[in-house]
Amino acid sequence: MSELPNPDEFLAKIDHKPSPRGWMDTPVEIRKNIACHAAKPERLETVGFPNPREWSCYDDDWKLPENWQEIIHQGFKERLDRFRSVKVFMDICVRCGACADKCHFFIGSGDPKNMPVVRAELLRSIYRNDFTTAGKILGMFGKKFKKSIGAREMTIEVLKEWWYYLFQCTECRRCSVFCPYGIDTAEITIFGRELLNLIGLNIDWVAAPVAFCYRTGNHLGIQPHAYKDMMDFFTDEIEDVTGIRVDPHFMKEKADILFITPSGDVFADPGTFTCMGYMMLFHFLQEKYGLDITWSTYASEGGNFGFFTSHEMMKRLNAKMYAEAKRLGVKWILGGECGHMWRVVHQYMDTMNGPADFLEEPVSPITGTKFENAKSTKMVHITEFVADLIKHGKLDLDPSRNDHLKVTYHDSCNPSRGMGLLEEPRYVIKNVCNNFYEMPANTIREQTFCCGSGAGLNAGENMELRMQGALPRLNAVKYVHEKHGVNMLSCICAIDRAAFPTALEYWLPEVDNCGVHELVANALILPGEKKRTVDLRNEPLPGMEDEDAE
Amino acid sequence: MYSLIAIIVLFLLAYVGAMLPGGEVFFGIIIPYLALIVFILGFINRIIDWARSPVPFRIPTTCGQEKSLPWIKPNNIDNPTTTGGVILRMFLEVVFFRSLFRNTKMALKEGDKISYEWEKWLWLFSLAFHWTFFVVLFRHLRFFTEPVPALVELVAKLDGFLQIGLPELRISGVVLLGALIFLFLRRIYIPQMRYISLASDYFPLFLIIGIAFTGILMRYFTKVDIVGVKEFTMSLVTLKPHIIEGIGSIFYVHLFFVSVLLAYFPFSKLMHLGGIFMSPTRNMANNNRFKRHINPWNYPVKVHSYAEYEDEFREKMVDAGLRVEKQLAAKPPEEPEEKE
């Protein structure tokens, strides 16, 4: 952070006017604080990926396989045959420019190659050269003609440009909302990163979680005993706050429900408070309704950094969810708060690793509600589950215990644009908090802005990039902070909870960040609990400390 | 600017060419037929080519509330779960450019406020362009049908309801030209647009401007022999092509531009006409969790099984009190461990 200018200087530097020089004539300059570190060889070895080696993006020599051009060309071709999306998106863009100023990275950086259309053109230019009739015919007349239709040959400079800009996209899909053809830059980035992985070009902040997750079951590499340790620690914390000792189950056979959530929430604040929130909720449901929910250390990761690597890697990591549910013999799966996890669960899991015919169609044993919308995948989002509980009056809630908070809600990219989960979390928040304020309409729901660190970009070495990406979101938070005094930015994504604290500290230190289930747990009245004087963060509840003193 | 030069060359080619002996046959009969064949075959070929690639995953971009709990109202258009909903979403997209209607313009104000301002010009003018182009095309059916369908007559009549001048002014042609010029100027004057525009963006604009311009020229200024034109176009339609004398070079330029557009179409971005219907983010229902989507090339992958996991961590798991499937092997003499 110390290397960054102060926020005012940062803002003053942003210029959205591109240079008159064309993008093809502007060679890539890989900058510190923007680029992420290269993947270490051991990560690739763990999952059997090609070309593991020590390398750095700042070196001239990236130590590529000799025939890398051929590998990329072949990989491109294969994927054109496998994904209609890629093929169509390569062909039909008319460059109307509607997407240009919709990208948080463009808004925050002014780098014209961060306009979604240009990001895609970086790949399209090679597509036109290698795979289209027009490209081949015009190519015969020389480079200049080629350039006129936006075609160019694959060179090492182009490859570096790909790597640099494909790791400046968080696959948030906001541009796709505005595109008249629905061209999805996420799809193009996913495809491009998949190609890069064929020759061993990844970033460590993606490759390391992938390798960890494969082996230990979660991105952070938490081994089973350590996972249990952390949960024990939370159990103590909860007891301090509530006087109740919760008893989470691990890998319990024949439990009703398997719960899977991102490991980030087990690991770092403020996600840990959300994790404690889940534990309290499950304890409540067990005590009150006898519902048996189990955690697993094998399937201890909801997120899926394989998604930021390749379709195959996504499938390999995702397989654990169904495998564990089957092994334990649970009825269905409940998924925690996470962004891209839900894109994978909602749009890919059943197709990749289904059918989950060994599970039951999800029914809430407490309310009897059938989750019709999840009857094939058999995985329910926790805010769907909890909204249903609240609607049926099954939770004992005291929202005034969140009265010290003025809350706004950040729609995480993937649940909003890759699923449509908009009302459920809002319903939950409004029932557990008394002060809720929406951010401006252009920045929420399907038009929500990314936290700026998704898709594996939440590293430390690319802090300038992350602050660029977070700017539009936090600018909207700032608006409600100034207008309504909002002091808490809630969300349903573990990456958000890892990214926002840093970004808030930089852009808007007056506001804090939390998960929705931290708010739920603050309001939730556990049977037999002691009078609460502090919230889960051990911060005094206004009004309560006085009574306590008396 | 390659595109402009290309258009001027094309203009001269047809203008002069049609005056040369045999030029009328070449530009009036051979080229249009060839262009039409290229268009039809090229278009079909492109669609088939797209269709050959499967859609392995169901990846709609959802722009509204999902269907979940019965008391939460889903957005059936922007987040459709049924084929009907998808068709409606697609219809609104194709006919009214719904996504473009969302467009806003971002601006950094007072140094630190990002605003998203009203910006409907792109939507308005692109809609105007597409619709008037369609109306103009539709009106042209009167050159290719005998008797002319009543609907075509009606559209032409409505199009000229202002009744200015003689022949009466057709609004569509003028709006078409105006919208095209706006779309062109936009690419020149907005720096971001200039940055992303390629020759292949200007070329079709110039080409259609050329078509509209020559059309207007013929109708209002050179007053082309309309009866002769109709006789000629009908001869093309009935596949008994013959040249009518004295139609004039501008007509051949017009026809040539149209031919070039047709032939160029399948190899260019203009294929968005077909492509939009095949865009997986827009033509699929968001029913992922209740209706399984099949990936035709789904293949088995190497996974890290629970057994492998437990084998690696069994001891630690047992120590932490976590349940394991296989118990630890009875330990042989314990000395080595004790020493540690």
Image (cartoon, helix red, strand yellow):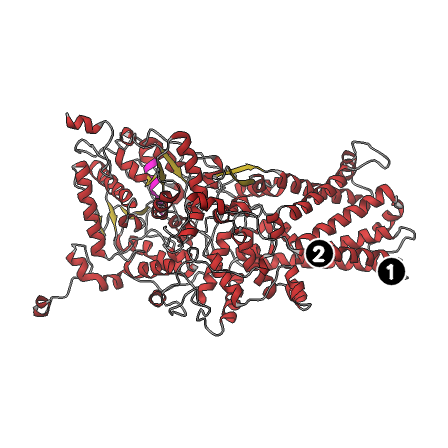
Specify the subunit that label 2 lies on: B
At 64% from the left edge and 61% from the top edge, which residue is drawn? Answer: A147
Q: Of marks 1 and 2, which one's residue comes earlier in the chain?
A: 2
At 29% from the left edge and 61% from the top edge, which residue is drawn? Answer: A215
Residue A239 image-quadrant placement? top left
Front-most of B322 and A515? A515
Residue segment shown in magenta: A378-387
Left or right: where does residue B260 sit relative to residue A510? right
Instruction: Give the residue type at disc 2.
Output: Met
At 85% from the left edge and 55% from the top edge, which residue is drawn? Answer: B15
- Residue B326 in percent (x, y) is at 19, 62
- Residue A177 in percent (x, y) is at 52, 44
* Secondary element at image label 1: helix
**Image quadrant where one finds the C terminus of chain B:** bottom left
Could one spot residue B39 in this view of the protein? no
- Residue A64 in percent (x, y) is at 45, 71
Check disc 1 and report the residue beneath it. Answer: B23
Classify B43 as above or below A476: below
Front-most of A85 and A9? A9
Other-residue count near label 2 (Cα within 10 Å), few / some / many at <14 / 14–19 / ≥20: few
What is the tally of numbered marks visible in this picture? 2
**Image quadrant where one finds the N terminus of chain B:** bottom right
Specify the subunit that label 1 lies on: B
- Residue A454 in percent (x, y) is at 41, 50
* Residue A379 among those drawn in magenta: yes
Task: Choose mark 1 or mark 2, whichever is in front.
Answer: 2
Main SS category, magenta section: helix
Contact (Cβ within 8 Å) of mark 1 with mark 2: no
Check disc 2 and report the residue beneath it. Answer: B1
